Amino acid sequence: MKSVAIIGGGITGLTAAFYLKRRGVTVTVYEATERVGGAIQSLSRDGYLAEFGPNTILETSPKITALVCDAGLAERRRDPDPKAEARYVVRYRRPIKMPGSPLGFFTTKLFTASAKWAVLREPFRPARRDGIEESIAEFVKRRLNQEFLDHAIDALVAGICAGDPQKLSVQQAFPKLAALEEKYGSLIKGQIFGAGERKRRGEVAKDRAPKFSFDDGLQVLPDTLRERLGPDVRLNATVTKLIQTVKSWLVDIRVGAQESRVEHSAVIYTGTAFRLAELGLASLQPLSLAPFGDIRYPPVASVVLGFRREDVAHPCQGFGMLIPKIEGFKILGTIFSSSLFPNRAPAGHLTLTSYVGGERYPELASLPPQDLFDLTCADLRVLLGVKGQPTFQHSVYWPKAIPQYNLGYGRLRDLMTEIEAKAAGLFFAGHYRDGISLGDCIVSGVNIVERVEKYLAAVTRNAPSLKSR
Ligand SMILES: Cc1cc2nc3c(=O)[nH]c(=O)nc-3n(C[C@H](O)[C@H](O)[C@H](O)COP(=O)(O)OP(=O)(O)OC[C@H]3O[C@@H](n4cnc5c(N)ncnc54)[C@H](O)[C@@H]3O)c2cc1C
């Protein structure tokens, strides 16, 4: 009987386990903590529903839709209020609505005439196709201008991955953007001409993809997958070492003070990159897992505050606001959570979810909760006209929040492929390999199933000849 060890009970590991089990493969998910979901963490308290990790799933692939249906969650899915589409970017120390159409772009106060002119010129700028990795900052300055970097991309990057545009690799962190230049010679031309191709592949661009959550928040998804997997999920079980034998994998596990060893036919690693670097795997030499320890995960604090509706001057009607560093605020951005999903706050109240830290101000993320509430309230007073005391406050500190696909990340991804080729039966999937968004992680979990099944089938075919030797 073939069995697969899945290291990590985040969304990637649970998705892979769920589909492998449905196809009749024996699986065990080893999760180091006492809960499933990893970065997903929802809390219901005092009539508020708070999300401390991701807030929504972007439905960029039919595989995401299929998982929701296959897990029996179609009824519990919640789409955001259609009135909550507006996104704001802070400029001149106030939130300004992002334009939603080409006409809106040319009339918005968010950008000066020089930035608008840069967009008109973009299709005529020479394309670079030398394959050399470039930071998102250099890329934007080359194709557009400094103003776009300082007032839009810097804010966007902070909102997506709490990252630094000077360090993030455009090819690794935003491969679709880099591909537009590679293929069409221009971002604008690529947007127009690439739409048909995306449609044929059944994909939706991230800026157009529908978002969704569940009635009780995103935690519903990992909790349901865990229920479906039953005893195949082992909590408080940290994998400490892997040993490759001729025909199997030995997985060392620590539960409390107890150590044990379990044999599996294959292993999928869906944990974090920094824990991967700590796993012993002697047979890899001269390759090593140690370089994955270089992947930077900056700290982030998620600060969820509730207010009485009348204590907030801004309508907060929309998705939220992004804040570029140049505007001088401490928070990275705020999601208007109860505008997206009205059940996130009791009647007559609203919920605002802000983020502190990231690559911009890593030292702020570890402040004590009351300091985080105070600095967040101070920024929200200026930006949204908040007055009075919060009616709900809760924060979660993520010491290592989101991996940064910085310059040089391509080398680490190549190393993952090299290790997989050398260590047959070991597979890598999840946020440190296939993209950081929840949607990317779900697709990663679905795709790895196919590769693992092929491997198991090949091992089964070769088994008699191994025995006869
Ligand atoms: C604050 C924050 C906000 C975010 N916002 C969004 C958002 O709005 N939209 C979006 O799409 N994405 C967002 N993300 C990103 C997204 O949530 C994550 O990239 C995704 O959930 C990662 O899933 P995963 O399963 O790959 O990894 P994880 O969720 O990190 O799960 C990995 C699991 O592996 C376990 N593990 C690690 N090592 C071992 C070991 N040796 N043995 C056993 N278990 C181990 C860990 O305990 C963990 O539970 C956010 C992330 C954070 C932190």
Image (cartoon, rainbow, N blue to C red):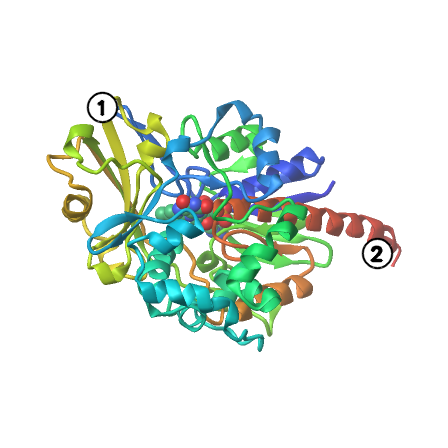
Q: Locate residue 287: give its quadrant.
A: bottom right
x and y percent of residue 131 in the render? 57, 74
Q: Which of 266 and 390 lies nearest the eye of the viewer? A: 390
Left/right of residue 418 with respect to residue 436 in the rendered view = right
x and y percent of residue 326 in the render? 24, 63
Q: Given the image, on which type of amino acid does mark 2 rest?
A: Leu
Q: Given the image, on which type of amino acid does mark 1 rest?
A: Gly
Q: Is residue 254 visible?
A: no
Q: Which residue is mark 2?
A: 466
Location of the N terminus (image quadrant): top right
Whole-number angstrom distance, CA of label 1 to CA of label 2: 69 Å
Q: Write the residue at 61% across / 40% down.
A: 63
Compared with 75, 188 (above or below) is below
Q: Earlier in the sequence, mark 1 or mark 2?
A: 1
User: Which of the two marks, 1 or 2, is nearer to us in this view?
Assistant: 1
Left/right of residue 5 with respect to residue 120 in the rendered view = right
Q: Which residue is mark 1?
A: 348
Residue farthest to the left?
Answer: 388
Compared with 94, 150 (above or below) is below
Location of the C terminus (image quadrant): bottom right
x and y percent of residue 349 in the render? 23, 27
